[in-house]
Image: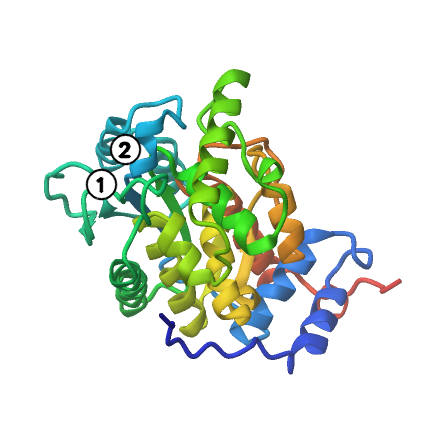
Amino acid sequence: MQTHFLIKPVGHVLTAALQDKIDQKTKPLGSLGQLEALALRVGTIQNTLSPTLTNPAIVIFAGDHGIAANGVSAYPQSVTAQMVANFLAGGAAISVFAKHNGLDLWIVDAGVNAELSPHPKLIDAKIGKGTRNFLDEPAMTESECAQAIQAGADIVQERHHAGCNCIGFGEMGIGNTSSASLLMHCLTSLPLAQCVGRGTGLSDAQLSHKLSILNQALARHSGQRDPLAVLSVFGGFEIAMMAGAYLKAAELGKLIVVDGFIAGSALLVAAKCHPEVLDYCVFSHVSDEQGHRALLDHFGAKALLDLELRLGEGSGAALAYPLIVSGVAMLNEMASFAEAGVDAG
């Protein structure tokens, strides 16, 4: 199985000019710290000295996991569908953050184990009612995995037609930290114990059980290293769709705001297929989930926020978005020394 995306590396023709524009603002050199680096990154991705943010969106992919039957989560699988309803009703954290930060929020049924009622903000892309239990067999067939990747790409294409040039992705799926941990282990070769965390709040005993189950699954499917094969065996429909969404967003030249651990695992798959996707990414936060900091180190990434979040949903991406707005505003609206008549240092 292969992916077919044409992702150009971000060029650096304007890097020096962007840096000079930032340096000429009425402030001590470098005094806005990471905000300056953020503004430089946005300008470089958009290849302009005056970047814009238009119709920004968060897309949440929801799907269930067969492995949830083995007690790897503190919550029952029914919570996935219940939280999708909560997103659509406006009651979830991401619903509130997206509303107050001016982000268009879309929810995707990638593979929820329930029949969901139609809603204007719900996209029906269901591959199946949850993945299979990877303790016994691959979570997805290659065909289902390819279908999910393409569905994620198609959803981003729709946002592109709506004028969106900045997009973030979230997820919902009971059991999906188990999938993310195995993806991380297989594709980074870091010890599995370093990749497995408490997810929705497991106790020490529950965490030990989760690690035991994942070790058994790993032994059952030993030797997987090809990113799409690993995704098929251990992934979720929502993770596969997110991987396709990342790749299409990069192909279309969008600024991508990366959320936490599970979103990072989907990006890991995408980056193993097309490393250029990382050129388009801004990493919103460091999750409190075990393994996320090591995953960011693997990407060579520095996150904007460290708020000890471990919610998912795209919540970190939504919280970081105002920083991106501020960085772009600084670049476009802050006066230079010459414009303000202020002596430069």
Q: Which of the marked residues, 2 or 1, is nearer the chain's N terminus? A: 2
User: Which of these two is toward me, 14 or 61?
Assistant: 61
254, 27: nearer the viewer: 254
At 34% from the left and 23% from the top, the residue drawn is 75
The secondary structure type at the circle numbered 2 is helix
In the displayed structure, would residue 243 be above or below residue 287? below
Q: Amino acid at mark 1?
A: Val
Tag of residue 112: 1
Query: In terms of image quadrants, where is residue 39?
Result: bottom right
The kind of residue on which mark 2 rests is Thr
Say if mark 2 contacts mark 1, CB within 8 Å.
yes
- The quarter of the image holding the N terminus is bottom left
User: Image quadrant for the C terminus?
Assistant: bottom right
Q: Which residue is mark 2?
A: 80
| Residue 104 can be seen, yes or no | no
Q: Position of residue 38 (x, y in %)?
A: 63, 58
Figure quadrant of residue 132? top left
Q: CA distance from mark 2 to mark 1?
A: 7 Å
On the question of residue 343 being in view, the answer is yes
Q: What residue is drawn where x is 54% and y is 55%?
A: 187
